[in-house]
Amino acid sequence: MHYAPQTEACPLPFSPFKSCTVPRPIGWLSTLSPDGIANLAPYSQWQNLTFDPPMVMFAANQQADGRRKDTVVNAEQTGWFVWNMATYALREAVNISAMDLPADVDEFERAGVTKAPCIDAPGPRVAESPCHFECRYLSTHRLPGNSPVGWVDIVFGEVMRIHVDDAVVTSDGKIDIKAIRPIARMGYYDYTSVTEIFEMRIPGASAAVADGLEGKA
């Protein structure tokens, strides 16, 4: 089957679009409002952009009534947002923090997770999460949609500080992803978690390229 999503109705009962770009890492993002209210919400359009310096992005669709997401507004107004790694053990908290709640509700409290202080960012991070990025806000790029919820804010940030729990670092200095079991967004209501890892090295890659791909410090 095939169809043009701009002009033709989807021939399937559920759109395949979000189920093709999978799995998608989750941007479990914490921010602080100018009034001092902590916000925590997951975004499935999240990705690293480059590594020198490390930069990231997330995309947040508007609400149906045209309101922009609290995470976007807080990041713009305070200049910071924090990424918290979403894990299988924290999946219920991640899901609760996805609820559409008023801006004056503290999602840390609603989700039952603990606030840990950041070093540079004004807002908290999730203490139970094993890895965090403190991100300095850079800019927002808005793309128009065909409906209010189709409008999207693409937010860019620079990673100013990285936190990794010593308990999830292996003896060879790598993060133990299989032990952490990060979760990722699929389509529909589906998620997955990392339980299997395999290695591939590019044939003929120079030592410098190989080191860069492996992330050697």
Image (cartoon, rainbow, N blue to C red):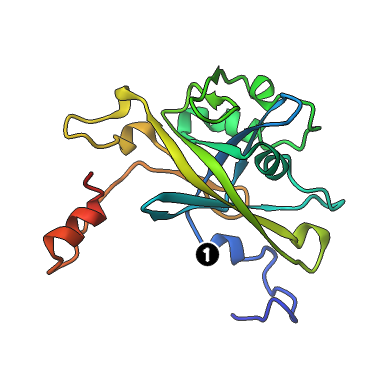
Front residue of this view, candidates 201 and 195: 201
Among the 4 quarters of the image, the one containing residue 145: bottom right
Among the 4 quarters of the image, the one containing residue 6: bottom right
Residue name at image x 66 percent, y 65 percent: 15
Front residue of this view, candidates 5 and 35: 35
Q: Residues within 10 Å of mark 1 (few under 14, many from 20)?
A: few
Residue name at image x 84 percent, y 53 percent: 66
Residue 199 visible in rendering = no
**Residue 76 percent coordinates (x, y):** 68, 44
- Residue with the mark numbered 1: 20
Q: Is residue 27 above or below residue 19?
A: above
Residue 34 lies left or right of residue 21; in this view the side is right
Residue found at the very far right of the displayed protein: 65
Q: Mark 1: which amino acid?
A: Cys
Front residue of this view, candidates 35 and 44: 35
**Residue 195 percent coordinates (x, y):** 35, 41
Residue name at image x 53 percent, y 25 percent: 126
Residue 60 lies left or right of residue 64; in this view the side is left
Q: Quadrant of the C terminus?
A: top left
Q: Quadrant of the N terminus?
A: bottom right
**Residue 30 percent coordinates (x, y):** 60, 33
Residue 143 visible in rendering = yes
Q: Is residue 53 above or below residue 133?
A: below
Element under disc 1 = loop
